Image (cartoon, rainbow, N blue to C red):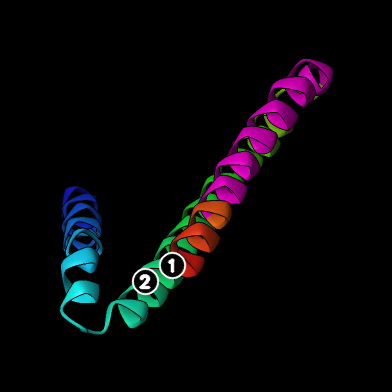
């Protein structure tokens, strides 16, 4: 588990480094547009993977809780929907940022 977190952080840092060098590459006639497209694709890909994983875990935990105590279904429903909405909002924000990166 710790290695996967480290790998995700390392990949994020390595992927963001070319984004900071975009202006210099564009000024020198480099390939900044390709880097922007790659950064946008990587951003939305990671956001979708993370959002889907988070929503799956939240739904699994809620179903497990309801399975153990069926009377708690009413109490678990509202926090579950709120949590899923926040996860989806983060994924949509990543999509917006990816569009802004690609069209800059």
The magenta region covers 71-94
The quarter holding residue 48 reads bottom right
Q: Are marks 1 and 2 in contact (CB under 8 Å)?
A: yes
Residue 87 spot, x, y in % from top left: 59, 40
Looking at the image, is 75 positioned above or below residue 2?
above
Q: Is residue 81 magenta?
A: yes
Residue located beneath label 2 in the image? 36
The residue located at (35%, 82%) in the rendering is: 34
Residue 86 spot, x, y in % from top left: 62, 33
Residue located beneath label 1 in the image? 40
The residue located at (18%, 56%) in the rendering is: 13
> Which quarter of the image is occupied by the C terminus?
bottom left
The quarter holding residue 63 reads top right
Q: Residues within 10 Å of mark 1 (few under 14, many from 20)?
A: many
- The dominant secondary structure in magenta is helix
Q: Residues within 10 Å of mark 2 (few under 14, many from 20)?
A: many
The quarter holding residue 32 reads bottom left
Q: CA distance from mark 1 to mark 2?
A: 6 Å
Secondary structure found at label 2: helix
Looking at the image, is 100 positioned above or below residue 93?
below
Secondary structure found at label 1: helix
Residue 75 spot, x, y in % from top left: 77, 15
Residue 47 spot, x, y in % from top left: 48, 56
Which circle marks residue 24 in the picture? none
Question: Looking at the image, which is closer to me, 50 or 61?
Answer: 50
In the displayed structure image, the side of residue 91 where residue 23 appears, left or right = left
């Amino acid at each position: 588990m710790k290695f996967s977190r480290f790998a995700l952080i390392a990949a994020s840092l390595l992927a963001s480094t070319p984004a900071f060098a975009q202006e210099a590459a564009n000024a020198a006639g480099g390939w900044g547009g390709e880097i922007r497209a790659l950064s946008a694709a990587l951003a939305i890909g990671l956001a979708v993977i993370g959002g889907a994983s988070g929503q799956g875990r939240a739904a699994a935990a809620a179903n497990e809780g309801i399975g153990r105590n069926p009377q708690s279904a009413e109490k678990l429903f509202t926090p579950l929907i709120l949590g899923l909405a926040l996860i989806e909002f983060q994924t949509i924000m990543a999509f917006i940022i990816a569009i802004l990166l690609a069209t800059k």
